Image (cartoon, coloured by chain):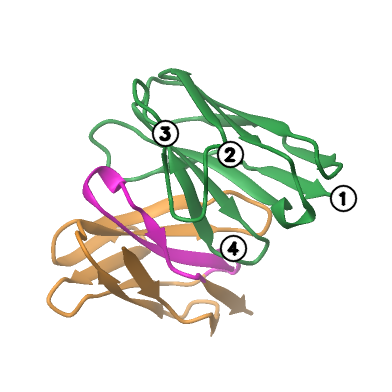
């Protein structure tokens, strides 16, 4: 099984940079994913790290360190629309046994 | 990406009844998943429904309560049986397209059991 821990809430201002950390305890861990979910909406995929290091997709980047069982999501140039919940998720091979963290609620203020 | 639709989008049901939720995908996928999410909470995997095999249920979920069908590569149903108020939740299906290390989620079914 797997368990993932992330902060429950983060607040930042427009234009700032915010980092959401995720630590995990797993067996058979294959990679770390990040999802964004706005209130009332479905989770949408942001990023995946199958290997150690940094993955960059526009304003969002994600990092994984397997030796530290740790990853993070970095959001740059924050916009009001980035206010949402962000989930880290760890899966086994073919995403079997996928587990989601409790989610981090990001509030972006003017 | 994959486009996923779910029916119904929401429902209010009486305890003791059953509701079947449908999930339709616009492309053929082998791997399909069913999740439950309480408002403001995380997602909990109910079962993995791969076409051509029996659904695999996670701890705490049983086939008698949550029977799943997967008749083809684009469709699946989840039934919530003998409902109680504790079953009130959002139910989401997701798929993992071949070669993609990600899941795409349907819009969810909001269920309220009275």
For the residue labelled by badge 2, is the local secondary structure a helix, a strand or a loop?
Answer: loop
* CB atoms of marks 1 and 4 within 8 Å: no
Mark 3 falls within which chain?
B
Q: Which residue is at 59% across, 30% downward?
A: B5
Measured in 3D between alpha carbons, the distance from the residue under mark 3 to the one under mark 1, in whole angstroms, is: 28 Å
**Chain coloured orange here:** A
Q: Residue furthest front?
A: B64
Residue annotated with mark 4: A81
Residue annotated with mark 2: B66
Looking at the image, is B68 positioned above or below residue A106? above
For the residue labelled by badge 1, is the local secondary structure a helix, a strand or a loop?
Answer: loop
| Pointers 4 and 2 within a single chain | no
* CB atoms of marks 3 and 2 within 8 Å: no
Mark 1 falls within which chain?
B
Residue annotated with mark 1: B114
Q: Which residue is at 24% across, 69% downward?
A: A63
Please report the bounds of the magenta region as a residue range: A79-103
Measured in 3D between alpha carbons, the distance from the residue under mark 4 to the one under mark 3, in whole angstroms, is: 37 Å
Q: In this view of the protein, can residue B101 be seen by the observer? A: no
Looking at the image, is B6 positioned above or below residue B113? above
Residue A56 placement, left or right of A22: left
> Residue B63: image x %, image y %?
52, 38
Mark 4 falls within which chain?
A
> Residue A84: image x %, image y %?
58, 65
| Pointers 2 and 1 within a single chain | yes
> Residue B80: image x %, image y %?
66, 39
């Amino acid at each position: 099984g797997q368990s993932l821990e992330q902060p429950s809430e983060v607040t930042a201002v427009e234009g700032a940079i915010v980092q959401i950390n995720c630590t995990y305890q797993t067996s058979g861990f294959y990679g770390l994913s990040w999802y964004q979910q706005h209130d009332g909406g479905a989770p949408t995929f942001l990023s995946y790290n199958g290997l150690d290091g940094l993955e960059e997709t526009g304003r969002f980047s994600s990092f994984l360190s397997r030796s530290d069982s740790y990853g993070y999501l970095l959001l740059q140039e924050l916009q009001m629309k980035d206010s949402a919940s962000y989930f880290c998720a760890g899966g086994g091979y073919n995403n079997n046994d996928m587990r989601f963290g409790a989610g981090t609620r990001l509030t972006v203020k003017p | 990406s994959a486009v996923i639709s779910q029916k119904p989008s929401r429902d209010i049901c009486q305890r003791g009844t059953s509701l079947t939720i449908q999930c339709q995908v616009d492309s053929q996928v082998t791997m399909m998943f069913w999740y439950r999410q309480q408002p403001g909470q995380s997602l909990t995997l109910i079962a993995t429904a791969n076409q051509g095999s029996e659904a695999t249920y996670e701890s705490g979920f049983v086939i008698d309560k949550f029977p799943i069908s997967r008749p083809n590569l684009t469709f699946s149903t989840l039934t919530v049986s003998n409902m109680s108020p504790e079953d009130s939740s959002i139910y989401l299906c997701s798929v993992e397209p071949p070669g993609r290390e990600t899941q795409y989620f349907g819009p969810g079914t909001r269920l309220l059991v009275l």
